[in-house]
């Protein structure tokens, strides 16, 4: 199988400067990149700090360093060439055409977007629109989940500080980004010795997945990379991350929602991980 990855752009290199317009005030926030967590996935995680050269007194609610999770359609893994799968590299022309069409039609995110509805192979702007809507779908799923699960933040979930629009050079869009707590000494489940993980931590993770359903969320992607322990050598805290694939309860009846919860099996998958 041939796999061609995305190159790390200059603006995500250590020391690079970024500008984020905080929502909902559109206030510009100056950041400096410390490192990018690669390979990129649907959401691109970048460790940043408040730019020490700029006055950050207006942002006292933010820690000095945090993770910026960006939903940029340019890095959608679906673009990659995999065996006979047709690669769909990003181009500025196609992105600009798709963005202009959205502006002309006076719409942004399509709440009825379904990933299964795909354009023709030779429709480059159509594919850019598909990647844009897919990124928006995952962003809104994640931020909606964090909003529903506020009671779990700082314990078995990382803290969500807010959202913004990332201003990138030579782009026709400003991707959404989420500001998340950084846990510096965390390790994923598959990097931790099971012998050092206490029964209390395991119980807290299982109970958290049980609470998801009660709070109107299904995670849908409980895998070892989305379970973190801190510190990694002798964990005192365990958190579940990455809600880009999550589902949010809307107008379902209790019976309908319980069926969705059972089908997604978050607690079952958590038990299987241990």
Image (cartoon, rainbow, N blue to C red):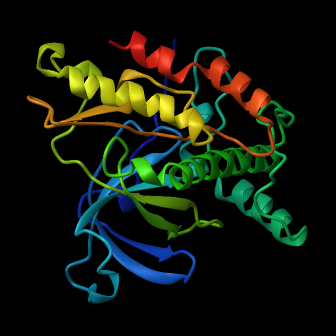
Q: Is residue 36 above or below residue 212?
A: below
Q: Who is closer to the viewer here, 7 or 256? A: 256
Instruction: Farthest residue to the right: give it.
Output: 105
Q: Is residue 262 above or below residue 180?
A: above
Q: Residue at x 79, y 61 (%)?
A: 97
Q: Is residue 62 visible?
A: yes
Q: Quadrant of residue 251?
A: top right
Left or right, 126 with reference to 203 = right
Q: Residue at x 9, y 29 (%)?
A: 234
Expressed as whole percent of the image width and height from the top left, the position of residue 267 reads 48, 20
Instruction: Farthest residue to the front: give it.
Output: 254
Q: Is residue 245 visible?
A: no
Q: Who is closer to the viewer here, 13 or 32? A: 32
Expressed as whole percent of the image width and height from the top left, the position of residue 206 reads 39, 24
Q: Quadrant of residue 274?
A: top left
Q: Residue at x 56, y 61 (%)?
A: 176
Left or right, 29 with reference to 62 = right
């Amino acid at each position: 199988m041939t796999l061609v990855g995305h190159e790390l752009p200059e603006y995500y290199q250590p020391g690079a400067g970024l500008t984020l317009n905080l929502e909902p005030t559109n206030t510009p926030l100056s950041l400096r990149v410390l490192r990018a967590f690669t390979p990129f996935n649907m959401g691109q995680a970048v460790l940043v700090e408040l730019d020490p050269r700029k006055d950050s007194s207006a942002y006292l609610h933010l820690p000095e360093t945090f993770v910026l999770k960006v939903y940029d359609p340019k890095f959608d893994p679906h673009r990659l060439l995999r065996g006979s799968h047709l690669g769909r590299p990003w181009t500025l022309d196609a992105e600009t055409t798709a963005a202009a069409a959205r502006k002309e039609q006076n719409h942004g995110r399509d709440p009825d977007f379904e990933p299964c509805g795909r354009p023709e192979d030779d429709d480059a702007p159509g594919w850019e629109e598909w990647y844009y809507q897919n990124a928006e779908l995952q962003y809104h799923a994640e931020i909606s989940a964090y909003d529903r699960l506020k009671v779990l933040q700082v314990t078995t979930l990382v803290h969500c500080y807010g959202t913004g629009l990332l201003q990138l050079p030579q782009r026709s869009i400003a991707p959404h980004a989420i500001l998340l707590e950084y846990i510096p000494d965390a390790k994923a489940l598959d990097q931790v010795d099971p012998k050092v993980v206490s029964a209390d931590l395991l119980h807290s993770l299982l109970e958290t997945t049980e609470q998801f359903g009660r709070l109107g969320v299904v995670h849908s992607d409980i895998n070892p990379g989305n379970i973190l322990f801190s510190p990694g050598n002798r964990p005192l805290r365990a958190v579940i991350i990455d809600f880009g694939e999550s589902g949010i309860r809307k107008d379902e009846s209790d019976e309908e929602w319980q069926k969705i919860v059972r089908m997604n099996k978050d607690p079952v998958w958590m038990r299987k991980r241990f």
